[in-house]
Amino acid sequence: MEKELIKDLKNLVGKDKIHSYIEDRFCYAYDATNNFFLPDVVVIPRSTEDVVKVVKYASGKNIPVVSRGLGSGYTGGSVPIKGGIVISLEQMNRIVEINQQKKYAVVESGVVASDFAEEVKAHGLFYPPDPTSLEYSTLGGNVAECAGGLRGRKYGTTKDYVLGLEFVTAEGNVIRTGILSSEDDDLYDLESMLIASEGTLGVITRIAFRLTPIPPYSETVLAGFEKMEDAAQVVSDITAAGVVPSALEFIDGDTLECVMGYITVDFIQKSEAVLLIEPEGEKEEVQSDMKKILEICEKNNATSIKSAETKDEKEKLWQVRRSSSAALLRLAPTKVNEDVCVPPSQLPNLVKGLKEIGQKYNVTINTFGHAGDGNLHVNIMCDRNNPEEMERVEKAVEKIFEVTLKLGGTLSGEHGIGITKSKFLKDEVGETGIQIMKKIKSAFDPQGIFNPGKIFPEN
Ligand SMILES: Cc1cc2nc3c(=O)[nH]c(=O)nc-3n(C[C@H](O)[C@H](O)[C@H](O)COP(=O)(O)OP(=O)(O)OC[C@H]3O[C@@H](n4cnc5c(N)ncnc54)[C@H](O)[C@@H]3O)c2cc1C
């Protein structure tokens, strides 16, 4: 079967785009989780036409098709758990147009997010969504997961910038929406269904994004706290005061300690928690916001406050946050990362709940994330080769989701459902929610060839 599949695909799109050796397939079998499943073959298309040919073929033979950006996903979304064809969009990476006057851009879906942000900046404009993974994730992956980022509190997430999509349907037809289409906009909004669909409804091939002017001014501060609850209270108080910084990031003390051993940080002392806060906008407004922010930090017992005086210092403060994820691996070889989200006012309760869960199941929980949105990355540091520990980790994860939902939160702030969270989906959206989503899925993909086994719990 495999031989015929590979021969057919080579005939359809050219043999240079087909990768079937085991060592090639290995490179497309994983993402940032601990899941590993080999695809039967990897196709690296160069155009929408290539994608159409592959999907039409797969549809005719009922073969699974898994879209892949750069595999940085945290929920197993791009892992081909049922084998089949991985379509890696990595070489559909052209920035097609940046329109300075009308402030929009059109890209192929395999463009790396940081390349896009840089190019947009060089054109005097700004693309706000900035996932921490922007240097190793694609814009297609960002749309398919509705990626959030460090500036999400003020600017929103990827969905707030999509102006149009081009995607290939399960029958191999091409649909264009929004400004990429000449059709009337006053119809069913297919575009918003594709956003966060995790490769289950179509292969996204082109995206049009809204751009904004570059914010003229910003200030950055890193504040340390002796008690984690104090830092969480600052987040809640800043929200209550109506101040909307572009970044309001939280890092717990153990993570900070790892960072301190990972990069040179001589401007902050050991604390149980730190907040990186950055208001951005017109100078007067930013200065007034920063005054309020500093007052709130002091009121909540900040033990250290470091304001960036220069561009270099600002970069150093950001380095603390950006290196948190990598630095944690100093603690243990395996990181089980869950991104949960609660209303910002519930952050103190979430932080308290996580502490109790860590103690109850005797697991090491490290937390950092986009606290301004109530979105925390909860990392359980463990060793996947220790089955007894992994059993406790699994129980702790279940409890984390339970606490999150009780606090009015959601299972996924930005990483999606994939395979790692599918068994908890019902707790969040209920049986009716799942049934409606399944009907949408089968309307787009009646045979179920796109990313099978994802999002929906399997019996
Ligand atoms: C250290 C680290 C930090 C991270 N920080 C953040 C963060 O701050 N914010 C955040 O939101 N996420 C973050 N992530 C998660 C991840 O980077 C995002 O989910 C990202 O959007 C995935 O992009 P990707 O190109 O790697 O997609 P992949 O991992 O390859 O795929 C992700 C999902 O999208 C689907 N997909 C990919 N491309 C397409 C396409 N063209 N058409 C249809 N479906 C497609 C796949 O099938 C899969 O379901 C982080 C991950 C890591 C490892």
Image: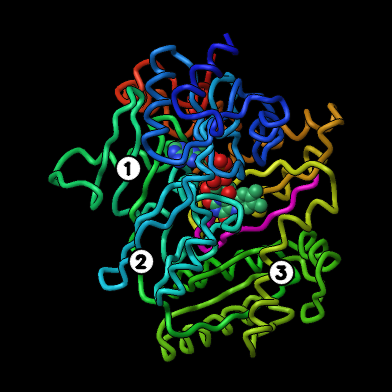
- Residue 46 appearing in the image: yes
The residue lying at 59 percent from left, 13 percent from top is: 2
Q: Please tell me whether mark 1 sits on a helix, a strand or a loop.
A: strand
Q: Nearer the viewer, mark 3 or mark 1?
A: 1
Residue 18 appears left or right of 393 = left
Asked if ligand 1 lies within 8 A of label 2, the reply is no
Specify the principal SS of the magenta part: strand
User: Could you tell me residue 190's position as x and y percent?
Assistant: 27, 38
Q: Please tell me whether mark 2 sits on a helix, a strand or a loop.
A: loop
- Residue 350 appearing in the image: no
Quadrant of the image occupied by residue 285: bottom left
Task: Name the kind of residue labelled 2 in the image.
Answer: Leu
Quadrant of the image occupied by residue 439: top left
Q: Please tell me whether mark 3 sits on a helix, a strand or a loop.
A: helix
Residue designated by label 1: 166
Report, in whole angstroms, how far the alpha carbon at label 3 lies from the one at label 2. Answer: 28 Å
Q: Quick check: marks 1 and 2 in contact, CB under 8 Å?
A: no
The residue lying at 36 percent from left, 50 percent from top is: 207
Relative to the observer, which residue lies in front, 158 or 13?
13
Q: Nearer the viewer, mark 1 or mark 2?
A: 1
Residue designated by label 3: 320
Q: Is residue 382 above or below residue 227?
A: above
The residue lying at 51 percent from left, 27 percent from top is: 454
User: Could you tell me residue 11's position as x and y percent?
Assistant: 47, 22
Q: Quadrant of the N terminus?
A: top right
Residue designated by label 2: 211
